[in-house]
Image: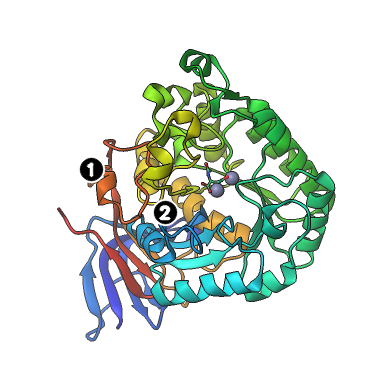
């Protein structure tokens, strides 16, 4: 069925587009773009007063399938993605079994095709079983559809192993995605190391556990020339490390997540396990550095690191709770809040949530263009709503943003020309 979006504000930084007009979608593609379009056979949707942007892309999502479907699965995770305005997600391999063979990648791709409400791009493992001992058969993973490799959840501790992985990945020009952490420095830590950890009597994770690892991973990116992507930056020092590696010509990109842009270690108050994630919430200075780095482009993109856990892993003592928070259904709202505050422009925000991840991972989309994929997000900038985890389409309820009032949201998500989400006024 063809779809005709009428009278929206067509907003695409990548094609320098910001004007009121229509978009016609058919055969999974954008058929006509801009101006006044008529198409008798098409389903017409009024988008007056709303933003029509390229479909948002989340480069860091844990869909938990196979193996931990009680936390999330491909169907629920992509439903949550669509509700958050995302048309594509990259799926991390720390599943059970780990996505370290073609069989697992095939399963994810097949499930996503059948039940998915968003495009799913699997990211394969760097080492077999994420054990850090033996490289995976990357060629086989790439052939099956993986767009990058990572041991996310764990760093690759052995620098020589990571160097070899980068050299191997370079031959297919896929990104090596680094969870940059010095496990010896972070050992036993459950929140940021500082006065608040002392006050709460919790073991701390110092900045250096991340910064030293980012320095190493960035140095290897420069050494090898491989496409390198650094996950979930949380510290000011990490932004500086990435900035220097970029200046040296490294093909390096990085991300931060909405929680590092808005929350700090103090928000762990009352031992709220929904504010426990890895890396941990840092200081106010770090939060400001994340915002500045994102605005100036040193931080290329915002990813959610959507990490659903069940009540079994979260409704326990802080020390024992699992690391990770969900993010797919709140990311856009939080980012709109930052735009409202003047932290970044609307143009920067859309770029960091669509074009930047598409470029870094060589994915289609990120742009509104004729014959491009009909992946679009319709956003109401002025539709305040309150985060209610019980209404999430994700199986995960572990959000640090419960009760927060957000200024706007996705009201319609279209992926491959199909409507994947419509916001119903409740
Ligand atoms: N970020 C987290 O706190 N948790 C992630 C792992 C990861 O992203 O490193 C998870 O898989 O739960
Ligand atoms: Zn990680
Ligand atoms: Zn992750």
Query: Which residue occupies the foreground of this view, 198 or 231?
Result: 198
Using residue 4 as the reference point, say whether residue 54 is left or right of it: right
Measured Cα–Cα span from mark 1 to mark 2: 28 Å
> Residue drawn 22% across and 47% down?
383
Other residues around mark 1 within 10 Å, as few (<14) / some (14–19) / many (≥20)? few
Which x, y percent locates residue 342? Answer: 40, 34
Location of residue 273 by image quarter:
top left
Which residue is located at x 37 percent, y 75 percent?
A: 417
Q: In this rendered view, identify the residue nearer to me: 113 or 272.
A: 272
Q: Residue at x 56, y 34 (%)?
A: 234
Residue 182 seen from this side: no
Mark nearest the camera among 1 and 2 is: 2
Checking the image for residue 384, the label placed there is 1
Nearer to the camera, 286 or 203 = 203
Residue 190 appears at what percent x and percent y? 54, 29
384 shown above or below 284: below
Label 1 element class:
loop
Is the CB–ligand 1 distance for label 1 below 8 Å? no
The structure residue drawn at horizontal position 45% and vertical position 76%, both measured from the top left corner, is 113
Residue at the disc numbered 2 = 71
Image side of residue 363 versus residue 170, left or right: left
Furthest-left residue in this view? 426
- Sequence order check: which comes first, mark 1 or mark 2? 2
């Amino acid at each position: 069925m063809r779809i005709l979006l009428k009278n929206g504000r067509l907003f695409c930084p990548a094609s320098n587009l910001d004007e009121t007009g229509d978009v016609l979608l058919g055969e999974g593609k954008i058929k006509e773009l801009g101006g006044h379009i008529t198409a008798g056979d098409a389903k017409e949707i009024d988008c007056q007063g709303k933003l029509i942007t390229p479909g948002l892309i989340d480069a860091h999502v844990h869909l938990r399938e196979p193996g931990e479907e009680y936390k999330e699965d491909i169907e629920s995770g992509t439903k949550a993605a669509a509700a958050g305005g995302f048309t594509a997600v990259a799926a991390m391999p720390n599943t059970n079994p780990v996505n370290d063979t073609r069989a697992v990648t095939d399963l994810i791709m097949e499930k996503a095709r059948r039940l998915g409400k968003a495009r799913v791009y699997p990211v394969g493992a760097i080492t077999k079983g994420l054990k850090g001992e033996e490289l995976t058969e990357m060629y086989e993973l790439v052939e099956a559809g993986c767009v990058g490799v990572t041991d996310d959840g764990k760093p690759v501790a052995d620098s020589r192993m990571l160097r070899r992985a980068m050299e191997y990945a370079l031959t297919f020009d896929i990104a090596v995605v680094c969870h940059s952490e010095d496990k010896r420095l972070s050992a036993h830590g459950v929140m940021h190391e500082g006065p608040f950890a002392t006050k709460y009597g919790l073991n701390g994770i110092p900045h250096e556990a991340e910064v030293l690892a980012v320095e190493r991973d960035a140095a290897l990116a420069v050494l090898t020339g491989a496409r390198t992507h650094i996950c979930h930056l949380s510290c000011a020092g990490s932004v500086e490390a990435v900035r220097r590696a970029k200046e040296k010509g490294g093909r390096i990109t990085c991300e931060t997540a909405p929680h590092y842009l808005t929350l700090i270690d103090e928000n762990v108050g009352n031992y709220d396990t929904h504010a426990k994630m890895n890396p941990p919430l840092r200081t106010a200075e770090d939060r400001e550095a994340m915002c500045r780095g994102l605005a100036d482009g040193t931080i290329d993109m915002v990813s959610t690191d959507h990490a659903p856990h069940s009540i079994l892993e979260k409704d326990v003592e802080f020390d024992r709770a699992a690391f990770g928070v969900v993010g797919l259904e709140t990311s856009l709202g939080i980012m709109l809040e930052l735009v409202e505050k003047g932290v970044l422009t609307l143009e920067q925000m859309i770029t960091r949530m669509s074009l930047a991840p598409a470029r870094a991972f060589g994915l289609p989309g990120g742009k509104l263009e004729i014959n491009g994929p009909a992946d679009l997000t319709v956003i109401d900038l002025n539709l305040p709503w309150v985060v209610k985890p019980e209404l999430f389409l994700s199986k995960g309820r572990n959000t640090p943003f419960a009760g927060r009032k957000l200024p706007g949201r996705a009201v319609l998500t279209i992926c491959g020309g199909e409507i994947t989400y419509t916001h119903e006024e409740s």
